[in-house]
Image: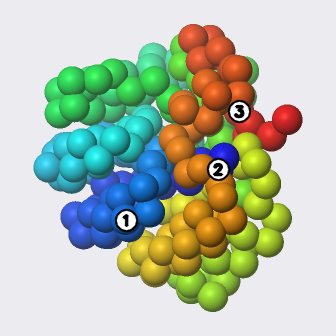
Amino acid sequence: MVALTFDDGPHSRNTDDIVNILSKYNAHATFFMLGSNVVKYPDVVKRVYDAENEIGIHTWSHKELTKLSSDEIKNEVNNTASEIEKITGKIPILVRPPYGSINEKVRNAIDNPLILWNIDSLDWKSRNKEKIVPLVLNDVQDGDIVLLHDIHSTTVPAVEEILKYLVENDYQIITVSQMLNAKGYDLSKTRIFYSARQ
Ligand code: NI
């Protein structure tokens, strides 16, 4: 199993396109959303959720949490969670800190599992399918968490190729929570995950 994760959205068009591709391959992914975009595109949030994808918290404003106070960190997380809950009826559990930036203060301020990644597509940097696809697939293994961004249009065709390969090679493409649960991890505690490789 592999978990694809999409950060920084939702985006008015690209997120929808990715949701459609996921559905085509009977795959499900985790979207770590920014509160500031959630309030702009609530209908997209609803479609992501209705297609049985997972929604996680990527903070409200994408600030580096290590530079904020504990109260500011909690507000960034809790305000985003409550906007998502208003739309989906479900409180999101997983948190992805912007830039993967974590320290003791961040860990103490957040009660949720912190989800980092072990495969970085660098899609935000290359904006090029020919570079994104091999970065993801060259070293892919069971239990991997892949970082992608649904705000970039160049990521959309890359996702199609990645899914085609993974499905043909019998990987299950599931949400981060589903994968961690399947591997026997306890999601009720604060803990940092880079992957579910065992
Ligand atoms: Ni981000």
Q: Residue at the location (51% across, 41% down)?
A: 175
Instruction: Note whether 56 is above or below 159 in the view shown.
Output: above
Mark 1 neighbour class, 10 Å CA radius: few under 14, some 14 to 19, many 20 or more: few
Please state the horizontal and vertical placement of residue 4, each as a whole percent of the image: 56, 53
Question: Is residue 161 left or right of 191 when viewed as pictured?
Answer: left
User: In the structure shown, which secondary structural element does the residue marked by tag 3 occupy?
Assistant: strand
Q: Name which residue type carries label 3.
A: Phe
Q: Residue at the location (55% across, 72% down)?
A: 164
Label whose residue precedes the other's in the sequence (2 or 1): 2
Q: Write down the quadrant of residue 100 in the picture.
A: top right
Query: Which residue is denoted by mark 1 in the rendering?
Result: 24
- As drawn, the label of residue 2 is 2
Label pair 2/3, CB-CB below 8 angstroms: no
Front one among 170 and 77: 170
Q: Residue at the location (43% across, 74% down)?
A: 156
Instruction: Note whether 45 is above or below 185 in the view shown.
Output: below
Please state the horizontal and vertical placement of residue 64, each as a whole percent of the image: 56, 42
- As drawn, the label of residue 193 is 3
Mark 3 neighbour class, 10 Å CA radius: few under 14, some 14 to 19, many 20 or more: some
Q: Name which residue type carries label 2.
A: Val
Label whose residue precedes the other's in the sequence (2 or 3): 2
